[in-house]
Amino acid sequence: MKIWTIANQKGGVGKTTTVAALAGILSARGYRVLMLDCDPHASLTAYFGFDSEKLNYNLFDWFAQKPMSAKQARNTIIKLKNENISLMPASLSLATLDKKFSSQEGMGLVINKVLNEIKDDYDYVLIDCPPILGILMINALAACQFLLVPVQTEFLAIKGLERMMETLNMVIKAQHHTIDYKIVPTMFDRRTKASIEALRNMRDEFGGHLWERVIPVDTKFRDASRLHRTPSSIFPDTHGVSAYHKLADTLLAMSAQSKVA
Amino acid sequence: MKLNKPEVTESQTVLEDYVVSLLIDPSEKLQQNSQAQLTAVAKTNDSQDKLPQVEAITDENVALKQVVSDVIPLKQKNLSHKTSKQNKSEPSLKENVSKTTPHLAKIINVQNNSKLQSEEIQRKITNEPEVDDEKMFESKSIPINERFNKKQSKELQQKHTEKINQEIEAYEDQASHQKNFKENNEKDPRLQGVEKLLAKIALANVIVPKETDHDSKTTIQAKSTVEIMPDDLSDADLASSQASFSHREKQPLKDILGSVFQTLVFEVGKLPLAVPLIKLGGIVNVSEQDITPLVGTPDWFMGLVPHEKGNLMVVDTQRFLMPEQNTDQQQAYRYLIILDDSLWALACHSVGDAKNLSPEDIRWSSGSSKRPWFAGMVVEYMSALIEVDRLINMLTENIVD
């Protein structure tokens, strides 16, 4: 099982879209995919048409029920009807996690331990992170083998990236092992000077960690979310989906390399 | 453009400590703490591994004692009256012994060596050439010094025999001690539990206490006993009731909240209310059947709902905050919003999203005496931000009245 976390401490940079798009592409390529919604706003859960407050189980149960067995964990996961993808939904109650459990040691390893219980069930797990540093983000970073940081190609978004890198460094320092990451420029609009300038700045600053391509602005992403479907399954020929296919290629190649190493 | 490296601030250090504490694996910590126990059990296992050998030694010792008791008088006899027949039988006995009991053979070798040494001493004293036992036996007269030396040799021989017997007893003591230890070990369930526990630690990343495990059961029982101890319970009750009933300092939200804070929006009737997450104790899904009403309480007090924190005191929010509104056709409440660390819970009809806000997003109240609980209006969502501490004070004052 490979775990990829999609995180950025700035909201609205395309994290949920990236998770949905990559999940659809990986699933279409025959991989068994689980999406984990760690955001109390439950954007990913809502993306696929679920009302988080009406579901029997959500990610909060993983934290409330410790230790969680593989069987219990499987019961909490939803299998999507139209796609060969599974979803671990979020709920608003996740917002209270930091207040409830912050004094307990080891609360940053809950997701890692539960995923370890079901490691044979999935090939890829994609974690959609909340835009706030807390137990959920630490869990997502501690569990992952690879971090994907979508960054909107605009000046303020790049400034927000600083905080994300600081958080990543904290986790790396605490865990004593490094986490490989890629910064993915999103919502790139070649018609605007701001996008071009921001992309240039990103290249200067992050060089090797910056994905060499971009995810363009594409209104079809919004349409896909309205239809509660992954972009690749419903609009397979759009520029946006094509860009995500290339991103998936890069990530799979890196994943294969790390396996060989 | 180069991003500026921020200076390490105190808040960042606190944050780093927080991240570290979140990432400490309690099972690893437990594993480290159990290292001493692990070593102890490893020793126990070692001694268990050795026990079959010890048993063999014990058996050998019994045989040794038997054979030595047979051999020693024989050898003593040989010193003075050794016959050729006996002389022939001894090597065969030695062979049998060395085959069956190597330890015994070793001891006998030591005994023989000492015999040879004493004979050598004797020869040196008398300056006589080495003679066969047979020839010695054949000699008719034995000189006085020779007789003296023989006596000395016999004493030496007896000393060695005593030494061997002491060694045998020591072996027997050791063997019986180890056997007792093994038996005790087998009988003592605590040691078995420790072994099982440590085996789990060694094999698994996560320690999962199994109900079938006697020791784990004991631990769980012990833990639950600790949890329901009257002292602890009274402390928790005291803390909760203190948090619920003690008068809170009127520190306005405006002064507590940071530059960006999260706020939960929920609805009571058609009025959207908001509570900052730092003052949110929890959200509980509830039906009216779960609420136990209490006699002699105000009409806005719906009753109690059991919760892990204690019995939540449920407030009919609409009646309490908007008494002027008609509540006859009110829908059933679905959620409880727990206020801070108190047991007060506001009943509400629906819960919305948590919103990121900044103080500029609020139109702050000037401090009306009519609605002290009203901190201000969240302009974007047109919801009333609750001054949680003041509301708790109001509830406490009203319930006491």
Image (spheres, coloured by chain):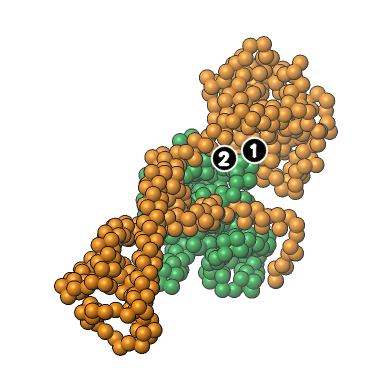
Chain colours: A green, B orange
> Percent from the top left, x then y, of residue B276?
69, 39
Residue B151 versus residue B111: which sits nearer the camera? B151
Residue B356 showing in the rendered view:
yes
Q: Secondary structure at mark 1?
A: strand
Query: Residue at the spot x=57%, y=42% of the render?
Result: A94
Where is A164 relative to B310, above or below?
below
Residue B29 in which image quadrant: bottom right
Q: Which residue is mark 1?
A: B264
Query: Residue at the spot x=61%, y=28% of the render?
Result: B230
Residue A231 versus residue B191: which sits nearer the camera? B191
Q: Specify the label residue A65 is tagged with.
A: none
Residue B28 showing in the rendered view:
no
Quadrant in the picture for the N terminus of chain A = bottom left
Subunit of mark 2?
A
Q: State the CA–CA distance, disc 2 to disc 1.
A: 9 Å
> Percent from the top left, x then y, of residue B366?
84, 33
Query: Residue at the spot x=20%, y=69% of the render?
Result: B93
Q: Secondary structure at mark 2?
A: helix
